[in-house]
Amino acid sequence: MPQSFVSNNLHIIFSTRERRPMIPREIQKRLWAYLAGIARNIGGHPMAIGGTEDHVHILAALPADLSIAKAVNLLKSNSSKWMGEQGREFAWQRGYGAFSVSVSNLASVTEYIESQEEHHRRRDFKQEFIALLKRLRIEFDPRYLFE
C-alpha cells in the first residue's frame, strides 16, 4: 500500500501544577483558542477544548508522524509561555492523560469537554480523572497520580 491512513483522535487531559486555580475564567477562552492554534500548527485538527481553572481537556486528531508525547510537550510548553506573556504566573503539571477516541464517540467526548463547568459542579478534577482511568481500565498507583 503506497499510502498511510491513520485515525488518531485523542482526548488529552492535563492539569495546572498542583492543580492550583491558575486559569481564571476571563482568560480561559483565549487560552483554549491558543491551544487550538498550537494543535493546528503541529499538523493536528482540534475538535474541542475546554476545562476549568485547574485543568484542560483537548480533543484533537494528531498527524501520523507526531508522537503523543511530543504533541503534548508542544501544547504545554507553548501555552505555558503564552500565559507568562499575559502576565500570569503559570505552569502545567508534569504528566498528562491521553486516550484514544473512536469516531463513533467524538460527539459525546466533545459534549463532555464543552460542559466542563457544569460537570465540575458535581465532581472535582481529581475525582473525574480517577473515574476516567477506572472506566478505561488503566492501572495506576494513587500515591503517585497527582504529584
Image: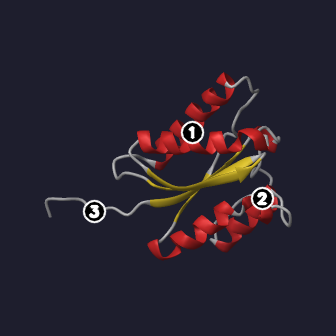
Q: Would you name the residue on which mark 1 appears? A: 34
Direction from residue 49 to residue 22 in the image, left or right? right
* The quarter of the displayed image where residue 34 is located: top right
Direction from residue 133 to residue 54 in the image, left or right? right
* The quarter of the displayed image where residue 32 is located: top right
Structural distance between the alpha carbons of marks 3 and 1: 28 Å
Residue 44 visible somewhere in the drawing: yes
First along the sequence among labels 2 and 3: 3
Q: Secondary structure at mark 1?
A: helix
Direction from residue 63 to residue 3 in the image, left or right? left
Q: Amino acid at mark 2?
A: Glu
Mark nearer the viewer, 3 or 1:
1
The percent coordinates of residue 124 (x first, y second) are 83, 59
Residue 102 drawn above or below residue 3: below
First along the sequence among labels 1 and 2: 1
Q: Would you name the residue on which mark 2 appears? A: 117
Indicate how the structure is coloured in the image: secondary structure
Q: Residue furthest left?
A: 2
Q: Amino acid at mark 3?
A: Phe
Residue 23 visible somewhere in the drawing: no
Q: Would you name the residue on which mark 3 appears? A: 5
Structural distance between the alpha carbons of marks 1 and 2: 19 Å
The residue located at (66%, 67%) in the rendering is 112
Q: Nearer the viewer, residue 144 or 123?
A: 123
The residue located at (78%, 44%) in the rendering is 25
